[in-house]
Image (cartoon, helix red, strand yellow):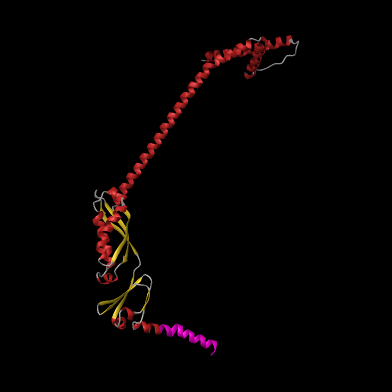
Amino acid sequence: MSTVQAAIITFGLLFVIVPILGWFVRSFGMYAIVKEGTRHVYVLFGSVVGVLEEPGLHLLWLEMGWRAILVNWFGQRHVLDMRMDQEYLRSAPVNSEEGAPMGIGVWYEMYISDPVAYLFRNNDPRGSLRANVSNSTVRCLSNMPLAEMLETRHVMSRAVRGEVSPKSSEWGYLLGSVYIRKVHFRDEGMIRQIEEKVVNRLRQVTSAIRQDGANQVSIIRSTAESQAAVEFARAAAMRPQIVGEALNEIAKDPEIATALFEVLEAENLLRSSPDLTLIPSGGSGLAALLAAEKTARVAGAKASKGAAPARDQGSS
């Protein structure tokens, strides 16, 4: 036999004949495979004949006897998912004690605890549980004070779970964790009013903080100016005393006093920006001429200033 023929025969056995043979054997109830997290419920002629709970390979003729041959042909097999499921119920209508229309968002978990009760006690266990959670939320959380409704979510979650769990256990569909996820206002006008109040309050707080800061700055500035004025006045009062004491010390030595006053006089002359005329030594006559010229120039300037008003009066 060639390699190609062996491969074709192996392919046919593994992918064609073996699945067909497995389906034929399962159809006559020889065995069943239960996957992890599932349950198999077998019903024959309106009665439950077997429930497979453990995952793995099960021989049905050992579990159900002779009924295993008929259950796949004349009965039903229900495969149930036993894993935890979650659902979120949005905006259940609730009124607070003050009459504010509120919406409650409830997140809850559920799982199948009794497969037989889940199948035959209630036609729609999931929908019934959803309605039960909604009704319990409205019944337990209505007429609560608004402050408690906005703050004590853990207490509200426990109250809703305690109200729902006894009823849901009868359907084989247990309620797990319950958490009040969201509490909000349902009236748009009320939401806008609350927003306006919050904005106005923030503005008031901001202006109060700003005014308080300005007052603190004014107090600090006035205190600093007052202290500076006191120090400047003290310095101005002490200056004559300090200068007098220094002059007394300088006057004890005539040479130093003379030199000091000459320096001060020279500084005053330089500070006033005078017109200086340098005369060589021995030029006493030149000095007299310059002095006379300057005197005449000053007299002419005064005369011109006095004549101008006189001409103005004559013309008028």
Does 2 lie within the magenta span? yes
Q: Looking at this view, is 248 or 278 the one in front?
A: 248
Residue 38 drawn at (x, y percent) = 35, 71
Q: Residue furthest front?
A: 62
Q: Residue furthest bottom?
A: 1
Q: Looking at this view, is 178 or 258 the one in front?
A: 178
Residue 239 drawn at (x, y percent) = 55, 16
In percent of the image, x 29 and y 70: which residue is there? 115
Quarter of the rendering containing residue 203? top left
Magenta range:
1-20
On screen, residue 55 versus residue 276, left or right, reads left
On screen, residue 131 versus residue 8, left or right, reads left
Quarter of the rendering containing residue 86? bottom left
Residue 208 drawn at (x, y percent) = 37, 37
Quarter of the rendering containing residue 130? bottom left
Residue 224 drawn at (x, y percent) = 47, 27
